[in-house]
Image (cartoon, helix red, strand yellow):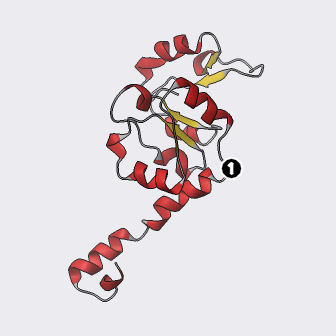
């Protein structure tokens, strides 16, 4: 699923005929990739994916937000270019909640060897940050509980 619909042709060409476009849906025969190529639908379809690969993170600096996939229980594989989402990505790496690959070969290995516990580890990262706003308000208002920060 390209995040930007204008990339649909580029993505389809890269899949070399192994894709089913949403606009030309046909029943899959087994190994095709389903390409959602319309703007604004990525979040809705992510929950139906087996894995989320953040393609932009292999080619450009910045990456995309892995949180959407993690929050719906989909494992994430990305490249090394995820600077726009630091420190989240560092936290996910340290927790074993994201797979990072630096080459096509590493991506293929990661696709075939996703750790079963990756989703639980990934979900633990945002959960440990839960309540940050309340702690910040307590800190600035001088209320009790700020010492627990």
- Residue 124 spot, x, y in % from top left: 53, 61
Whether 98 is drawn above or below 125: the answer is: above
Could you tell me which residue is drawn at 46 percent across and 60 percent down? 126
Whether 73 is drawn above or below 3: the answer is: below
Whether 40 is drawn above or below 135: the answer is: above
Question: Residue lying furthest right in this view?
Answer: 29
Could you tell me which residue is drawn at 42 percent across and 48 percent down? 89
For label 1, the residue is 116
Question: Residue lying furthest bottom in this view?
Answer: 144
- Judge left or right: residue 48 versus residue 99: right
- Residue 54 spot, x, y in % from top left: 48, 34
User: Would you call the spot at circle 1 few (<14 residues within 10 Å), some (14-19), or many (20 or more)?
Assistant: few
Could you tell me which residue is drawn at 68 percent across and 49 percent down? 116
- Residue 140 spot, x, y in % from top left: 21, 78
Q: Nearer the viewer, residue 135 or 47?
A: 135
- Residue 31 spot, x, y in % from top left: 72, 22
Q: Quadrant of residue 44?
A: top right
- Judge left or right: residue 33 versus residue 8: right
Q: Nearer the viewer, residue 42 or 105?
A: 105
Q: Nearer the viewer, residue 94 or 50?
A: 94
Label 1 residue SS: loop
Quadrant location of the C terminus in the rendered image: bottom left
């Amino acid at each position: 699923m390209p995040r930007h619909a204008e990339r649909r042709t580029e993505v389809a060409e890269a899949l070399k005929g192994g894709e089913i476009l949403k606009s030309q849906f046909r029943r899959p025969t087994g190994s095709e990739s389903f390409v959602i190529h319309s703007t604004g639908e990525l979040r809705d379809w992510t929950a139906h994916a087996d894995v989320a690969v953040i393609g932009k993170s292999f080619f450009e600096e910045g990456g995309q937000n892995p949180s959407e996939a993690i929050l719906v229980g989909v494992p994430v594989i990305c490249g090394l270019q995820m600077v726009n989402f630091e420190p989240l990505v560092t936290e996910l790496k340290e927790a074993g909640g994201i797979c990072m690959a630096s080459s096509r070969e590493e991506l293929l290995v990661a696709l075939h060897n996703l750790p079963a516990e990756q989703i639980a580890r990934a979900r633990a990262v945002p959960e440990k940050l839960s309540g940050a706003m309340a702690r910040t308000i307590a800190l600035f208002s001088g209320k009790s509980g700020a010492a627990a920060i």
